[in-house]
Image (spheres, rainbow, N blue to C red):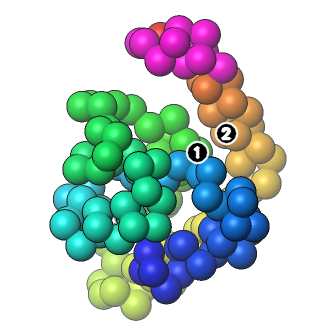
Amino acid sequence: MLQNQIVPAIRAVFPNDQFNSLWFQQDGCPAHNTRDVQTYLTETFGEKVISNNGPVRWPARSPDITPLDTYLWGYAKNEIYEFDPPENRQVLEQRTRVILENINRNTIQRVIRSVEKKCRQCIEQNGQHF
């Protein structure tokens, strides 16, 4: 997925000079931290990888302040399981697709503003708790 989708998508947005200055950050999910993944990321991003096993260590119990982590995953999970659990993977994927396609644009903009506020607070506190 990294090699075939994520990194090519990033390269499509950022020209080489900008791509070469990017930092890649991931969370502590075990699948994200296998030796093969870490090797690929280091080959692709050099020392600019923040992860559990990368050149720059992900701080223990570090909260994410991205819109995906502060809002989207919890919202989607609540909506998907609001009634009955999905009977199979196909139903799960269909529910997820419908839910994500129908998120209110104004809601997403409020979430993004909230994350921007948290980023400013983090900078003001020099990365310490706030």
Task: In the rendered view, tell whether residue 83 sits above or below residue 74.
Answer: below
Image coords of residue 103 (percent x, y):
68, 60
**From this viewpoint, which residue is outermost toward the bottom?**
90
What is the quadrant of residue 58 in the picture?
A: top left
10 over 91 or under it: above or below: above
Q: Is residue 82 above or below residue 8?
A: above
- Nearer to us in this view, 104 or 116: 116
Horizontal arrangement in the rendering, residue 106 relative to residue 56 (left or right): right
Q: Give me the residue at 29% from left, 39% from top.
A: 57
* Circles 2 and 1 in contact, beta carbons < 8 Å: yes
| Mark 2, other Cα within 10 Å: few <14 / some 14–19 / many ≥20 | some
Q: Can I make out residue 33 in this image? A: yes
Q: Is residue 40 above or below residue 24?
A: below
The residue nearer to you, when weighing 5 against 93, is 5
Can residue 83 be seen here? Answer: no
Residue identified by numbered label 1: 67
Give the residue drawn at x 40%, y 90%: 90
Q: Position of residue 96 (x, y in %)?
A: 50, 73
Left or right of 113 on screen, residue 60: left
Q: What residue range appears in magenta?
A: 120-129
Kindly state the secondary structure of the residue where label 2 is placed.
Answer: helix
- Identify which amino acid the numbered label 1 is placed on: Pro
Q: Position of residue 127 (x, y in %)?
A: 47, 18
Disc 1 residue crowd, few under 14, some 14–19, many 20+, Cα 10 Å: some
Which residue type carries mark 2? Val
What number is the disc on residue 111? 2
- Labelled disc at residue 95: none
Residue at x 29%, y 67% (from the top left corner): 39
Mark 2 or 1, nearer chain start: 1
Q: Position of residue 43 (x, y in %)?
A: 39, 67
